[in-house]
Amino acid sequence: MAWYDDYFPRSLTKAERREQAAKMAAKITKKKGRQLSPVEVEGIKIAKTFWGKAWCDNIESYEDEDHRLARGRSYVRSGSVIDLVLEPGNITALVAGSASKPYIVEIKVAPLSASQKAHIRSACAAHALSTLDLLQGKMPQPLLEMFRSGPDGIFPTRKELVMNCSCPDWSCPCKHQAAVLYGVGHRLDEKPELLFSLRGLELEELAAGAAAADLAAPGASELPGADLASIFGIELAPPDAVPAGMPVKRKAAPTPEKAPKAPATRKKAAAKTPSLPKMLMYICKYTRWGNEELAKNLGVTDGILDTLLLAPSSASARNLAKVQKLYKEVERIVKEAKAAKKSRDGKK
């Protein structure tokens, strides 16, 4: 064996790298009890969705004099990125290489500047976008181009990345860093929202900004006061019985002396509030609203409404409070209308 065979180990095949990576990951999990988040690419395509592909396209716009990007693609396809964590402004990873221990890669991502964020918010506000539209890349072409390129785009330029790797290769990016960058593209296929948090943007804020003008209109989040009979589908009391505008009845805050002291009393009161799905069903039953009308009267975007309907357990406290408020309004009106109808029927 020549001396350079020890200094420059032979390149492993894809199958050998995959096997080596699996052994390293198993060893770390067993020895340190650490739950890893590996990048597992099936087939040749590293990214298949809009955001994943756009991220990879952006990477390939970087200068690559030493052809490290190609080596990185090979590494990520062979499962060498055994752990990948994305946090706001930071990417950390473990990459299996020729050493007995995985290499540690850290990539700092500069957050968007205030002017960049303002430009993106302004562009999104000009279009009717939902969170789902953003995540799926379903946007007008000018907005797509803005996201993908230019000084105000969401994808980082090479100068906005500070990359470090524990390997002895001084190239930047080295093949391990390149593998991690491609691994991020693959991860964005699964969780595109990570890109927004990586650059310091709130995804819901971008989507909500598109509907801000409509939702800020007077009374947009309140029940309409006109033509209530057609809205609720039942005969309502005359105007003097149900005041126009239907103001919400709010009780004054209890004084310290009258505040409930027993925890059991508070639990009993809380138990009377229906679950989120039941409240939404109740509202739709009596108002006959579709999703668009429901979202508008709740003061939320279509994307947030989808979350409330499909994943109620993940609803924020703020949005839950909006549903509870609208539910109580509808419940009050229905009770008053039914009482008025019963009263009139009794007089006949």
Image (cartoon, grey):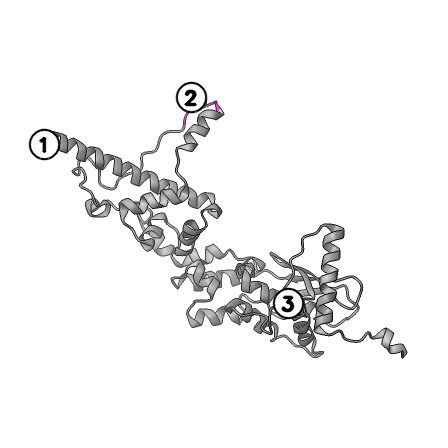
Upstream in sequence: badge 3 or badge 2: 3
Upstream in sequence: badge 2 or badge 1: 2
Q: Which residue is mark 3?
A: 181
Q: Which x, y percent locates residue 189?
A: 54, 65
Could you say which is closer to the camera, residue 14 or residue 57? Answer: 14
SS at circle 3: helix
SS at circle 1: loop
Q: Which residue is mark 2?
A: 258
Q: Is residue 255 magenta?
A: yes
**Horizontal placement of 190 versus 308: left or right?**
right
**Which amino acid does the dot numbered 2 rest on?**
Lys
Q: Which residue is mark 1?
A: 348
Residue extending farthest top: 257
Regarding residue 60, the answer to whether it shows in the image is yes
- Over which residues does the magenta segment extend? 254-262
**Horizontal placement of 123 versus 158: left or right?**
left
Q: Mark 2–mark 1 contact, CB under 8 Å?
A: no
Pointer 1 local density, CA inside 10 Å: few below 14, some 14–19, many at least 20: few
Q: Which x, y percent locates residue 187?
A: 58, 63
Q: Which x, y percent locates residue 265?
A: 44, 25
Q: Which x, y percent locates residue 147?
A: 50, 68
User: How far apart, in angstroms, are the residues tagged by discs 1 and 3?
Assistant: 77 Å
